Image (cartoon, coloured by chain):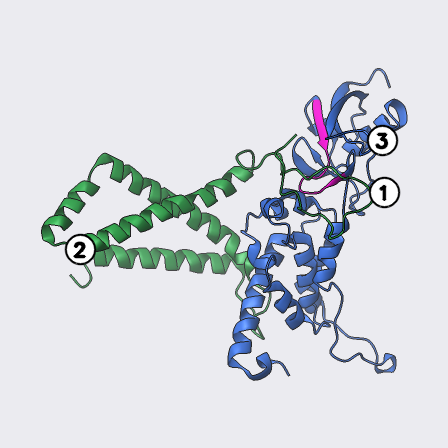
Chain colours: A green, B blue
Amino acid sequence: MARPAHPEAMAPAKPGRTRTAPPHRPPKFPMQGRYRAYTLFDATGAVYLLMGFGVLHAVRTLGDGEVAWQALLSGWAAPLYVAFHLLALVSVLFVGVRFFRLFPKAQPPRIGPAKPPPGPVILGMLYAVWIGVTALFVGILSGGIFG
Amino acid sequence: MSDLPKKTFVVTRFDPDQDEAPRTERYEVPCHPDWKVLDALNYIKDEIDGTLSHRWSCRMAVCGSCGMQVNGEPSLTCKQPVSELPDTVEVAPLANFPVIRDLVVELEGFLEKLKQVKPWIIRAKEKAVEEGTHSQSPAEHAEFKQFSMCINCMLCYAACPVVANEPEFLGPAAIALGHRYSTDSRDEGAAERNEIFRGEGTVFSCSYANECSEVCPKHVDPAAAVNQAKFNAVIDWATGLVLPRGGRE
């Protein structure tokens, strides 16, 4: 048998006259079959949490002066940090692609009197914005813009 | 029958009068090549073990009665060919539901949730019969037709990881049916339902696993309905903030 679900899952407000066996979870959850992609999608949250702590640490280091900042940057060149940033990049790409794939069908058929564009157009717009914003940030960080 | 190739069916059994917890029982079933899993279960009940309990009715994927876990996948047993399955077939009651007996699950909880979303046409003012029918164009009909194809088979609930964790969650089919009526051009109850959908355990509990849509045998796409309902609930809330009477006439 699969692992138990919440004991009250799908239970009626008032229990019936017959004793029931408690509900069990979907047997393949969390790591088998199609659930694997969903679980990995959720697990990327841990990567973003660590990234968030990293950003906070970087912001605090900025206030500690040039020497501390250079030490932080050289620390980021360590293989462990590089591997973590690669993991973060893969996580962002994975979440982005999954989110963009599912987003168009979340559009209602009408928003007031207006009809949203067809799914493929929405998908194209999302990717265009993603690429555009990424290019903008690359430009800013490399000094090409505001440099 | 004896010449037919045999498959082993491992069926979950639970007798509330005798069993502490569900157990499994194995049955050797000679299977016709064109059989569905439901045919094999009916064979077990008719020829091997008359105490087996399972729900079924139409045998053509219309009534939604025979949903079960087949080798871990929520499936309509009348639609799942035995020939596509390995030699050992595990049949269990739908996940995420209390089990009444063997393969029969308790659906009362779902019916209570369904009622909450008011799955009927709500009119601000009823039209007199002599005023004629409520006309609807094919384009207006197309906006909700997909969501009206739900047969309440509960496969979406069995696939949903949120249902397993949050007992208050209305769940995919109930929200899809509520959204179906909110999208119907004859309905004037969308604001009422949006208020329900903004409550706890409703559309915003959905984490968009999309598994409900993957297993839906009628291609209703409940995940689309849930997430469209999220969008509408937010738009309705925002409109209510900036326009008098929420922008409604």
Q: Are marks 2 and 3 in contact (CB under 8 Å)?
A: no
Q: Could you give the CA–CA distance between mark 3 and mark 1, rounded to whole angstroms?
A: 11 Å
Outermost residue toward the left in this view: A67
Left or right of A141? Residue B194 is: right
Under circle 2, the secondary element is helix
Decide if residue B146 is in sight here. no
Magenta residues span B88-99
Q: Out of B200 and A136, give the one closest to the viewer.
A: B200
Callout 2: few (<14), some (14-19), or many (20+) C-alpha neighbours within 10 Å?
Answer: some
- Chain ID at mark 2: A
As shown in the figure, which amino acid type bears the numbered disc 3? Answer: Asn
Q: Could you give the CA–CA distance between mark 2 and mark 1, rounded to whole angstroms?
A: 69 Å
| Residue that badge 1 annotates | B57
Q: Is residue B8 magenta?
A: no
Q: Could you give the CA–CA distance between mark 2 and mark 3, rounded to whole angstroms?
A: 72 Å
| Residue that badge 3 annotates | B42
As shown in the figure, which amino acid type bears the numbered disc 1? Answer: Ser
Q: Are marks 3 and 1 in contact (CB under 8 Å)?
A: no
Q: Nearer the viewer, mark 2 or mark 3?
A: 2
Q: Are marks 2 and 1 in contact (CB under 8 Å)?
A: no
Outermost residue toward the top in this view: B3
| Residue that badge 2 annotates | A62
**Looking at the figure, which quarter contains the N terminus of chain B?**
top right
- Quadrant of the rendered image containing residue B80: top right
- Quadrant of the rendered image containing residue B97: top right
- Chain ID at mark 3: B
